[in-house]
Amino acid sequence: MDLYAQNILDRYRTPFFKDKKIKADLKRHEANHSCGDAVDISLSTKGGKVIDFSFTGAGCAISMAAADMLGELVTGMMEDEILKLTKDDIYKMLGIEISMRRSKCALLGLITLQNAILAEQKKPLKTWGDY
Amino acid sequence: MNYRQDFPIFKNRPDLIYLDSAATSQKPQAVLDAVYGFYKSMNSNVHRGTYPLSEEATEAYEDARKTVSSFINAAHPHEVIFTRNATESVNLVARAYGDAFLNKGDEVLLTKMEHHSSIVPWLQLKDRKGIVLKYLDVSKEGRLIFDPKLITAKTKFVSVTAMSNVLGTIPDLKPIITAAHAVGAKVLVDACQSAVHIKTDVQALDADFLVFSGHKLYAPTGIGVLYAKTDILNQMPPFLGGGDMIHEVFLDHFTPGELPNKFEAGTPHIAGAIGLKAAIDYVNKIGFPVIQKIENELTEYLLGKFKALPYVRIIGPADMMGRGPVISFVIEGIHAHDMAEGFATKGICIRAGQHCAQPLMDYFEIPATARISLAIYNTKDEIDAAIRTLEEIYKYFNP
Ligand SMILES: Cc1ncc(COP(=O)(O)O)c(C=O)c1O
């Protein structure tokens, strides 16, 4: 069986950012109830820049690997830049073909992250239809 | 007898291994023919015909109602209301019956193994009217625990599934219904999963309401059934308003039509009802004893295979007692979605997720389950293929 690209499987098995202890000032929980994926993302920010990232969650390999790789992508990024990230950026980051039925898995981390920031900025939150 | 050959999809997709019949069943040729036949040579609207063609369509539509009526042993065909699906049927009851007869503080008793379609309409009624929801518990083995103390003088309505779409459990409904009636509560039975596997008898059950969807019973999507006792339907105000459901309409008031039209506003899914009749005829021709023999054998075979895999945890009854051919399972460390993806690579369709039963997932403290559900067209070879795939999936994640 060859289910997922090695990079996805590796990050699922040995994540860098999962359960990492950080001093968080932003937190957000989002879930994908139909498939049973859930993530909590914590961010430590300074002057609008993400300086630390951590997540916890339970979900499929794609959702967990995507959340973990997101940590690398956004550490050092400005909040406004993060809000501009799109579905394509995530697919590029994952480096694999994402089928329609797995798109929510791939994007769960991003929606959680962007909503963490939007909630803080008291702006309207993203919904799945926005991606 | 090989019933698989009655289902054209398996000819058109020879490699398909379809183990998701609890989501929707495949359709036999007889059903496709009935639907096509209607549009091909009988198409016209019902109940409004001033010409023979429409009379024929009306007769076929009402004949479908009669077939459903005897399939569930209703006392009268007008106790069968055609809806879009089980979900709409429950909503009709919660709206029309609930709004008219339930009040603040009244208790509605559900179970923790209900589908969202039997929970959310009552949560909505709770928001509208301040009713109180209570839930019968489920045991760790996936059996319904009937605690009679949960039926009180305040209980006005009970809604319970005849077969769990997650656990496969077939609860013993009779004691619950008897206890509910003893305090004057009405009972709705969700036969959405059970209708295709076991005999439905509304009179033997003494159910006040019973709902199911055609599409899980070899019939087309878009056609569902609400059964209710005549006197209840007569007391209930109509649900949707419009054509067909009225007797007279004036500028400032209307009078509702007779049963069953009173609850069937607008042009119904005529072809769907005719397809449902064909599906029921198909099931009746095989008969439940034969259906159960096939499905029980497959289910027992699958449960046996699962038991030989120590890493598979069955969510639901692990033996054949009081269960149907719907089997949920989890594997520690492998999310159900990843399992489903593994199955998909081999052309095997299984379901993964929460199965519209989030409260049940919360109760078992699992994010999701993988689910195999079986029907008369499945084979042991397909189960063998699924088990081989599951072993591969396990090895993939635990090299
Ligand atoms: C037990 C049960 N009840 C109700 C439903 C709702 O059926 P539908 O979506 O056809 O309305 C389902 C479908 O999944 C079910 O399994």
Image (cartoon, coloured by chain):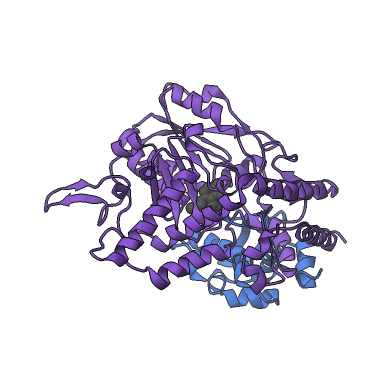
Chain colours: A blue, B purple
> Residue B284 appears at what percent x and percent y?
56, 50
Quadrant where the image shows the C terminus of chain B = bottom right
Q: Is residue B57 above or below residue B224?
A: below
B44 or A85: nearer the eye? Answer: B44
Q: Is residue B18 above or below residue B15?
A: above
Residue B161 visible, this angle: yes
Q: Is residue B4 left or right of residue B256?
A: right
Instruction: Give the quadrant of the N terminus of chain B.
Output: bottom right
Left or right relative to B222: residue B195: right
From the viewer's perspective, tell me whether residue A1 is left or right of residue B85: right
- Residue B157 placement, left or right of B237: right
In the image, farthest residue toward the front = B52
Residue B78: percent from left, percent from top: 35, 44
Q: Is residue B328 visible?
A: no
Q: Tell me the residue at 67%/53% (across/down).
A: B374
Kindly identify the residue that appears in the image at 44 percent across and 42 percent down: B123
Is B291 or B211 nearer to us in this picture? B291
Please name the residue shown 62% across and 60% down the image.
A43
Up-down relation of residue B144 to residue B83 (above or below):
above
Image coords of residue B83 (percent x, y)? 40, 53
Q: Residue at x 42, y 28 (%)?
A: B185
